[in-house]
Image (cartoon, rainbow, N blue to C red):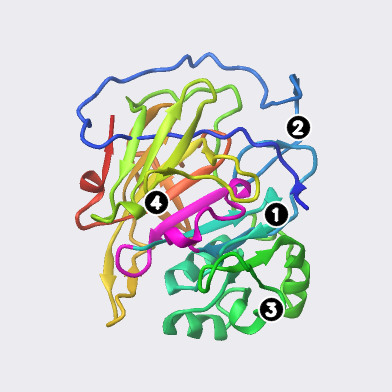
Amino acid sequence: MRVNQVFPVLACLCLLAGCGDKEKVVEANTNNTSEEVVPVTGEESTFPYFAPFTGMGVANEITQRPILATINNYPDARPQSGLESADVIYEMLAEGDVTRLLALYQSEIPESIGPIRSARDYFIELAAGLDAFYIAHGYSPEAQQQLVNGFVDNVNGMQYDGILFKRSSDRVAPHNSYFPGENLETAADKVNASLLYQKKVSYTYYKEDESVKIGTEAESVAITYSNNDMFNSLYTYDGESNTYTRQSGNAETIDYLTNKKVELSNVLFFEMSHSIIDSEGRREIDLTSGGTAYVFQQGLMREVRWENRDGVLKAVEEDGSEVKLTPGKTWVHFVPTKPGITTSVKYS
């Protein structure tokens, strides 16, 4: 059963490889004096609160602590369950060419999340900065030490396989471990963790009817992690819905639970230093130093910066203010400094 707290309007942006020479700058109308409203069933209703990680209006103040889950992105794990419900999805490299997803849930807890995969130390760092309750199944040696030391409140399938985590019969391990949303409160009780939203982490958003003011036209964007196309992605912008859809491995990204495509309002790329730390090819990713960032929203692209602010990774303007996001869902890619964001990301 889904717990709906917000009705998201999603946006998706797509960049095609190669055609990155278009430099048309578009300025939007700045005469915007309307209140922050969200359209519901054809009518405009002003909501008293806004969801911290989507900017969408909600009737009741959100008290749910963010939940961050490691989701398997191997082809045998697709389509995944619960992606459509996530407020934010972070994608980054694990070992080799393989990327993993960290899905942040707060506005809505889906019926099932997964397949769940193992933790890495930089996954845990991200969860700690967000003050999120962290869900994983397994861990690297570094991540295990952090979890044992209580670096972040968490529940792990290594201790609760078959208890809180359920195995699907239609897939094989390690691509079949799922976390049912209904087990969330039980999981928190077992590890003596609170599910209350206390740190009050959030992003900054445009008003619902406010347009992005400046940027380079970009109807599509592609991210290339390696020669293995199964982990490269393409985002395409739909001007009618004002959202981006996503393809990975030449297949549209959909949610297994609903069979609906994932739609996004913002697509972000953060350039970070990556290094290999062991013989298994595990990585260390620098989440603290900041660097170049690309922001795609409403069919426009801008180059900005990203910074780690009190553990939370945010896109920032030249003057240090936070980049405003378009209300809706967001997908964030971590891109290796070598070969770099300008090489890995192409748009047109």
Question: Sequence order check: which comes first, mark 3 or mark 4?
Answer: 3
- Name the kind of residue labelled 2 in the image: Phe
x, y (%) of residue 339? 19, 54
Q: Which residue is mark 1?
A: 109
Q: Which residue is mark 4?
A: 333
Residue in front for this viewpoint, 73 or 30? 73
- Name the kind of residue labelled 3 in the image: Gly
User: Is-magenta flag for residue 90?
Assistant: yes
Q: Quadrant of residue 188?
A: bottom right
Secondary structure at badge 2 equals: loop
Q: Residues within 10 Å of mark 4 (few under 14, many from 20)?
A: many
Label 1 – label 3 distance at C-alpha: 20 Å
- Name the kind of residue labelled 4 in the image: His
Label 3 – label 4 distance at C-alpha: 32 Å
Secondary structure at badge 1 equals: strand
Q: Residues within 10 Å of mark 1 (few under 14, many from 20)?
A: many
Residue 125 lies, with reference to residue 111, above or below; the image says: below
Q: Which residue is mark 2?
A: 47
Label 2 – label 1 distance at C-alpha: 21 Å
